[in-house]
Image (spheres, helix red, strand yellow):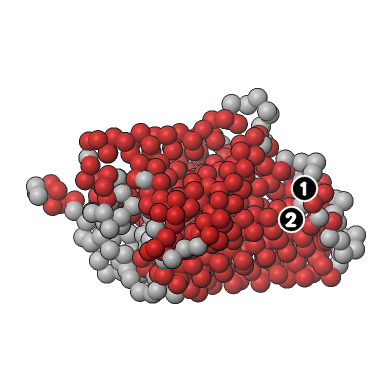
Amino acid sequence: MTPTEQSIAPVDVTLQRRSLGVPDVVFFVVAASAPLTVVAGGVPTSFAVTKVLGIPLVYVLVAATLLIFAVGYAAMSRHVANAGAFYSYVAKGLGRTWGVAAALIALVAYNAMQVGIYGLFGFAAAGALHQFLGVSVAWWVPVLVTVVVVGILGVLQVDLNARVLGFFLIAESVVVLVFDIAGIAKPAEGISFHSLVPSSLTGGALGAAFCFVVASFVGFESAAIYGEECKDPRRTVARSTYVAVTLIGVFYAFSAWAMTVAVGPSSVIDTSVELGPGLLFEFSARNVGGWFSDVATVLFVTSLFAALLSFHNAVARYFFSLGREGVLPRRLAMVNPRTGAPVAGSIAQTTLAAVLVVVFAIAGKDPVLALFTWLTNVGALGVILLMALTSVSVVVYLLRHRSVTESNLAHELAGVVASVALFAMFILAVANFDALVGTTPDDALNWVLPGIVVAAGLIGIGYGEWLRRRQPAVHAAIGSGGPAEA
């Protein structure tokens, strides 16, 4: 090893082990979906943009699809404990070159989601500072401060992060439940279940609705990302995945339905267009009290912070995994020798977030309509494609390793059903992408933004083939969790 190589060699290539249990992982998973952010921002935006009354039913359908997906995913997770998660699963099932494609799609998707959320956070934080302190600042000021804070937490002990996320998760979930109960207690048009019947799915952009709703679940696969740090990876990952998907699905479907009851099925779409994310706070003040609306406003900001922290941790571990295997520079595999946190990956994600925020700020782009809307929808689309590829890889892996995995027809059939459903969602979302970003049908953004996801996959395939021919040792380690094939 040359002196230069020694100077950049990672201190360690092992994440902290035996530190996380099922509750910790569930906190990470559910916090990434940010309950108050989804119900206050995502649900009314879904009604407003898609014009689909059946958003509560879409939550049920997506949750059912992800539970089916989780059957095979959990079965494979017992034999693949790797911080690369989807990337590692695809590499094990479809081959190492496809694994590189999945890795680049994942990096684009999760970075886009994390950085996009900074846009909404900046808007909400600047608004809260003006409302409560009378201080007026540009949206990017609180964002850049938070980028630094999230970066610092990213290199601290992972257990601390779980406790931070858990506190925010409980507080914002209580706020959402109070809003739900108050709305049901004071229904605008009586208790109605019209938003849960199949006919409620017609008359709008259903593909866009699926993309919005899938974005609410993004992070549920984080259970596998933390597989190496779990106390018992064989059981923790599977249990955490089932628990998280069920909790998210039931909670959000119920909250979306409660919103239709509180506002009224006949007017929830128009009211969502008028008030947007302010709908929850407006009706909270009306049904509970102004003080409660103020509390919800503050927790809306902390909810976004929790999501930023959770996505940051996930992206840092993708960087770590790719660096450890040599797909990206090996210095990205450096971890904190005291805490075992992926310090280099955390710094890389922090730097990327700061640069993109500065670019959007200098360009004068709107933090919500541009930064948040563009990037989070690109992220959601990427995750849908990633899950579809993972479903196919799970089926292939289980069929090839039946004697080792003890899989059965139910696991494999679940993977097939999930693959078909997820690819259908992806196609519908691309077809309705103009509704997602608020453009006209002939706007170039409708293809440029989804094209980023597809391009990442194609570049990954090309890079994977280049590694196979020029750096076979690196190619052989892809998806193995180390420098040699496991």
Mark 1 vs 2, N-terminal side: 2
Report helix, strand or loop for mark 1: helix
Kindly report the distance in space between the C-alpha atoms of the residues bearing marks 1 and 2.
8 Å
Q: Residue at x 74, y 55 (%)?
A: 57
* SS for dot 2: helix
Question: What residue is pinned by disc 1?
Answer: 201
Residue shown at 57% from the left, 69% from the top: 243
Q: Residue 373 location, x and y as percent?
A: 60, 42
Q: Residue at x 69, y 58 (%)?
A: 60
Q: Is residue 400 above or below residue 78?
A: above
Mark 1 Cα shell of 10 Å, populated few (<14), some (14-19), many (≥20): many
Q: Position of residue 31 (x, y in %)?
A: 54, 64
- Reply above or below: 388 against 314: above
- Circles 1 and 2: CB atoms closer than 8 Å: yes
User: Residue at (25%, 66%) from the top-left corner?
Assistant: 337
According to the picture, the residue beneath numbered tag 2 turns out to be: 57
